[in-house]
Image (cartoon, grey):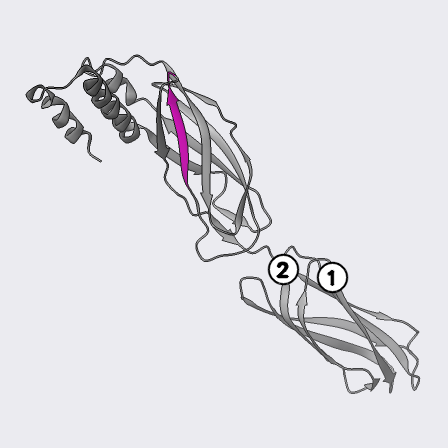
Amino acid sequence: EDPKYLDKIKNNVGRYKFRDAELKLLKNVLLLTKFKLLINNTFKLDKETYTTKEIINLNLGFDTSNLLQVLEDPFLHYELDEFNITKIVVNLSDNLAISKKTKAPFRIEVGKQSHLEFTFKPHFQVDNPRIGPMFLTCELNNNLIFIYETQSIEPHLISPPTTLNTSIKNLRPPLIGKTFPLEIVVENKGEGEALDVKIDVEFPEDLKVMRGTTNKQIFSLKTNEDLKWEISLKPIEAGDYIIKINIAFMDSDQNKIEETIDFPFSIKL
């Protein structure tokens, strides 16, 4: 992959006898090989970190400024102002899909830097998400073709944030000595799925649980899903109380999240 070895081949051509067709073929091989070695490519993402629900925008910089020295070589004697990328193949990890890419044929002006735009959609997490390498089929003057292989890049993907909202609601006015239903609602208002959700409700001694469970556990609560249930309570005496709801769950990246929410609750005479 060092151009100096190609120059060594060129310098030794005079030691051998080639037919015209053979010499032309050799020059074309040297030309295309130098093109592949001297084109530089860069990948640039529009963000450092993406959630699995965000679009990834990638800019491929295709720098052909080094090709001018090849075209100035009198031995190769090849004239070229521009060439076309006629086909673009993109390798991706299984969790990525291509949404948009530069259309082929795409004109490349020799001696300048061109930019090709790509858009990708993540679908789920994997250990090593990868974009590339890309394989660009390049055609010179409609008679010479080579395939250029780009680098690869690993975008940093995280799961979208998971947020659970919790609320309580009296379904009848609470009266001392009378049973009333209390509704508990846990909603996923975040962008990510909540896994292994555990809910524990703590009541003060003067709010007796008559019916219903104070513990809930579900495998999954997806975005915009909710969990509702009722608990029948009987107030023993008037006062201002605190109902505690403890929630623990795992986000999509297997991070454990725990929180306790206090709900003021008053019983009037």
Please tell me whether residue 140 belongs to the stretch shown in magenta: yes
Query: Residue at point 19% right, 29% down?
Result: 3
Query: In the orientation shown, which residue stands out farthest toward the left?
Result: 15
Label 1: how many residues lie within 10 Å, few (<14), some (14-19) or many (20+)?
few
Please tell me whether residue 59 belongs to the stretch shown in magenta: no
Quadrant in which residue 43 is drawn:
top left
**Label 1 belongs to which residue?**
225
What is the x, y in percent for residue 244?
72, 76
Start-end of magenta stretch: 133-141
Task: Give the left or right position of residue 193, taking residue 138 as reference.
Answer: right
The three-letter amino acid code for the residue at tag 1 is: Glu
Q: Earlier in the sequence, mark 2 or mark 1?
A: 2
Query: Residue at point 33% right, 30% down?
Result: 40
Q: Quadrant of the N terminus?
A: top left
**Label 2 belongs to which residue?**
162
Quadrant in which residue 206 is drawn:
bottom right
Task: Give the left or right position of residue 229, taking residue 200 as reference.
Answer: right
Q: Main secondary structure of the magenta part?
A: strand
What is the x, y in percent for residue 103?
52, 27
What is the x, y in percent for residue 259?
63, 70
Task: Give the left or right position of residue 195, taking residue 266 as reference.
Answer: left
Quadrant in which residue 78 is drawn:
top left
